[in-house]
Each structure stands twice: as structure tokens, then as C-alpha cells.
Amino acid sequence: MTAVVSLENVTFAYGEQPAVRDVSLTVDQGDFLGLIGPNGSGKTTLLHLMLGLHSPDSGSIELFGEPASAFSEGERIGYVSQQATSRGGTMPVTVREVVTMGRFAHVGHGRLTEADHDIVTDALETVGITALADRQVTQLSGGQRQRAFIARALASEADLLALDEPTVGVDAESRDEFYQLLDSLNDSGITIILIEHDIGVVTDRANRIACLNTELYHHGDTESFVESDALTEAYGTTGHVVEHHH
Amino acid sequence: MRDLTSLIGSEIGTETSADANADTDADTTTNTTDTHHTRMHDTRRRLELGGIALTGLLAVAMLGFLTLDWLQEYPYASALYEQFRIAGRLLDYYLGTNVFSHPYLWRSMATGVLIGVVGPLVGTYLVHREMALIGETLAHTAFAGVAIGLLFSSTTDWSGSLLLVALVVGILGALGVQWLTERTDTYGDVPIAIMLTGSFAVGTLIISYGRGLTGLNIQNFLFGNLSVITPSGARLMGILSVVVVAVVAVTYKQLLFITFDEQAARVARLNVTWYNTLLIVMTAVVVVGAMQVLGVILVAAMLVIPVAAATQLAHSFRETLYLSILFGQVSIIGGFALSISQSLPAGGSIVVVGIVAYLLAVLVSDQSAAAVSVH
């Protein structure tokens, strides 16, 4: 079985400032990888490298067994960016229009068929926002909006879902439901890579942890991470650890 | 119509969680008002589609006129062209006007109607990418192109179309802005301001240098002028419009995805740089066409104002596109009526009518917002 993502000795710098140094890791099919680390530790950069949005200065990155830069099956990846940076502040776009974007990589310049629209309807149903389909995305709450983006990934029939702090600014209750949804998607076979500042959420959900602070401090299953000192090493004495309270 | 949707919406919205009980409540609310709401929604949709169909017919008729105007030397076309002239005279006779019997005014109107379609069409993407002023910038670049063309034609025997030179320079300017933007990582206002003032500066230098060599009035290009729209200028607008509408029809989905979420579009392996370049080149093309009527200084208005008005009222992106074209037509036709009846400059009249329509749209959407008090 080929790995979904595999990185070998990847280094990347913005100018002189190294963001990611000598990182090697693999994500297998069906994994739920939690990517954690202090602010500015290079988590988002690493995720962008994995998705082929940046090219590494050295080392190699493969997506589904192909070099990430040459990978062309965009529909296999669903990406949910940080809410604060996602576009469309005042743009009138309905939830259904957003989810339909998931089909665009499939149809190219062609027309959307009845089957495409059915897939969109199913995706809306799966994440539980059918009733909101004709609402504008800008009118949704944070949790509902992130569900819409998940639905877009489902509509594109992605087998890899990459999420960058998806629940910033989402209330606790919606957040729990959002992570339940991720769990059930993971159970159905979708590989998930999640950046999350709340370490408790990650250790509760993920089966693999990558703990990063420019360099990789831990990469392996969740149990061994919890027992290791990787967290304190990566965050150092000055780092601020967000604990999960039940 | 909008208040109803928002009303239903805000009731669901207050139950921020998708909690099972909350969902049931929201569903009940939706169901009771559903049929009424659907009916109003359908009426609104039919009206919009009707408006778009009418606009389409008008645009096709205008393209037809431009074609006849072009081919009037040829046997069949000349007969049809005569019919057109007669129809124009009849129209004038019954309306008591002195407009439709003049071919040059038909040309202006044809150019205007086409600007009212392609301006908002391209503008919808620009405005929502926060690139509203790119049109203004490219207009100034095109102005430099006009200046270069003037100098070139006065110092050599070349007697081609100034607009063609403006088009080439405008497209080069568009690629230049794109290049600067890629290297400064944002459509910030700095590269735009540099390009805008820089190309205008070059234009003024060239005109000043070439003064005395040419008799052409540069004011027509700055402020636009209905009576100087040449047959070849109108024809250029016709061709450009067909191309732009065709390109947007084919790339509608990709441009939408990139406008809404550029990063996700990159991840989905859309060629973002290529589509960005396509959009900015189309902007240059539209600007050069529209410059004839609106002038360099006001040309950005047709890319921005109808879209701003449509955004106030639209529910979806597709509806924004439709409404912005309708607002574009209202501005153009209203502006022409004002301009011709009051002997005012067309560019200014079109922009003022557009802004009045925009303010009305703000008032209408404000009222519905107040009725619901969203957030």
C-alpha cells in the first residue's frame, strides 16, 4: 500500500528563516494525524508542503505516491483553511454553491450533470446542513461554515482531508459535534490531517501525532506521544500549552 | 423577499449548534413559511431571467446592427441596413425624438449596451477579489497606449486604430500588474497605485512631447465622447464582447472557485496563475472598449458600481452576476437618456445613474436588514 503522504528530510525556509527543518514522516491511508506545535512552529507551512502549495528547499514529498509538485488529481484532496484567512467576506455565495465547487475539479470546463448535483445533495446531507443549502455562507455560524467546507471536500470525493485549525472561533458544543463528524468520516476510510492548538482534542481523536517546532519532536502513535516528553521539549519552557478540560 | 429568507435564516442562525432539537425547531419554522417563500423566490427568479433574456436580445440586436454597419457595402447587407435606418426614422417619428435616425448614435448605443454586459460580468469577479481599482489602473495604462499610438501615427505614415494600440498596451499593462502582484504576494494597493500613476505619467509625457504634431483632442479619451465613437471602435467593442462573454461562459466555475477560496482552488489543482492572468487580461480588454464612452477617468465605474448594487440584493453568486448585468443596463440606458436629452456628457451621466441605482439598492437591503436585525 502506498502512503497517502510521505516526506523525506524536508527543509523549507522563508528567506533566511527556516520554517521546517529535516522533517520525515508518512501518513498512511485511514490515518488520523494530529499536527501540533506552538505558534509559529511551522505547522501550516508543513501542511502546505504536504499539499504541494510550497516546494521544499531540500528533501522530497510524495502525495499518493507521486511527487507533490507534479500531483494533478486535485479532487482527491479536501482542504479546509483557517477560518480567519478564508475568502469571501462579503461575497454572496450560497452554501450549495460552495459545496458544488467540490465538483469543479471533476468536470473541468464541462457542464455539471444531474449526477454531480446529486453528489452535492448527498454531501450536504452527510454533514447535516441540508436545511441551510440556500443560505449565504456569510450568514452561517462558524461551525456551520466549516461543515460547508467539509461538505465541499466530500463532494469532491476526496480521500484526504486536510484541516488547518478548523474550529477557531467556534463554540464548544458545535466544536464537539464537528469533531464527531470528523471521527465518522475517518471511520468511513478518509485520511485526515488536522492542525489543532487544543492538544486534548488531538490526543482524544487522532491515532497518530506529529509534534513540530521547526523540527519534528515526535511522530508516531498517540499512546507513545502521551508517554513521551515530546510536548514539553517542543513547546519549551516559554511555550504556552493549551490543555483540554473536560 | 430578502427579509423572509433572512428571517428564517436568523432563526436557524441563533441556534448556532446543529444540535438535534435546534434542528427540528428550525425545520418547523422553515416548513410553515416554505411555500410562500418558494413562490416569491420563483417570481423573483423569473423576473431576473426575463431581464437577462431581454438584455441578451438587446445585445444580439446591437451586434446585428454593428455587423450590418460594417457590411453595408455588400448587396444583401445594404438592403437590411436600409431597413434598419428606416426603422430608426420611424422610431424617432413616433417618439418625437431625434436620436434613432443617426447611425453614429446607434453605434454609441450598441457600444454602451455591450459595455453594460461585459463590464459588470468581469467586474463581479474583480470586486469580490478586492481588485476593484484594477480597472482604473488598466484604463490609465490604455491611456498611455493612446498617447503612444498618437505619437507613432504622427511621426510615421502608420494610420491604424489608436484603440488597437491602447488594447495592446493595456494587455501588456495587465500582465505587468500580474507580474508585480505575484512578486509582492497580494493585490495590495501599492503595486496598483504605482502602475496607475506611472502609466498616466508616461502618457502625459508622450502627449506633451507630441503636442503640435497631432490635432487629435485627448479630452475625448479622458472623458469619453459619444460623438467620436468610430465605426471601427464600435466594431472592436463588438468583437471583444463576444470573446469576453464566451470566455466567462467557459471558465465561470474556475473563476468562481478562485474568487471565493484561492488556496482551496490551488489545492484542487486549478491553474490559479493562468486564470488570474486571464481575468486581468479580460479586464484590460473591457476597459479599452469601455473607454470610448466613459473615458479613462470614469471607466472603472462600470466594473464596480453595478456589482456593488447587485451585491446588496443578491442571495447567490449566480444571482449577483445576473443582477449586476441588469444594473449595468439600467445605468447605461438611463445614462444615455439623461445625456442625450439634457446634452450632458455620457460618461458622467452613466456613472451618476449607476450610483443612484446603487443607493436605492442600499436603501432596499437596509430596510430588510432592519426588519430582521441580523446580528
Image (cartoon, helix red, strand yellow):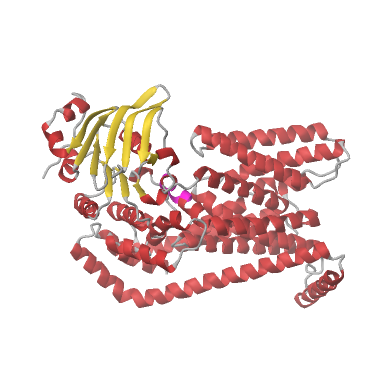
Q: Position of residue A226 (x, y in %)?
A: 13, 35
Q: Residue at x 20, y 24 (%)?
A: A236
The magenta stretch spans residue A111 = no
* Left or right of residue B191, residue A228 in this image: left
Looking at the image, residue B152 lies above or below residue B25: above
Q: Residue at x 61, y 64 (%)?
A: B330
Q: Residue at x 53, y 69 (%)?
A: B48
The magenta stretch spans residue B260 = yes
Q: Position of residue B264 (x, y in %)?
A: 41, 47
* Left or right of residue B78, residue B127 in this image: left
Residue B63 sits in which quadrant? bottom right
Looking at the image, residue B63 lies above or below residue B156: below
* Left or right of residue A109, residue B333 in this image: right
Span shown in magenta: B258-265
Q: Position of residue A225 (x, y in %)?
A: 15, 34
Q: Nearer the viewer, residue B83 or A21?
A: A21
Q: Nearer the viewer, residue B103 or A185?
A: A185
* Left or right of residue B318, residue B267 in this image: left
Q: Position of residue B275 (x, y in %)?
A: 54, 47
Is residue A88 in view from this perspective? yes
Is residue B213 in view from this perspective? no
Q: Nearer the viewer, residue B343 or A185?
A: A185
Figure quadrant of the N terminus of chain A? top left
- Residue occupying the far front of the picture: A1
> Count the marks: how many?
0
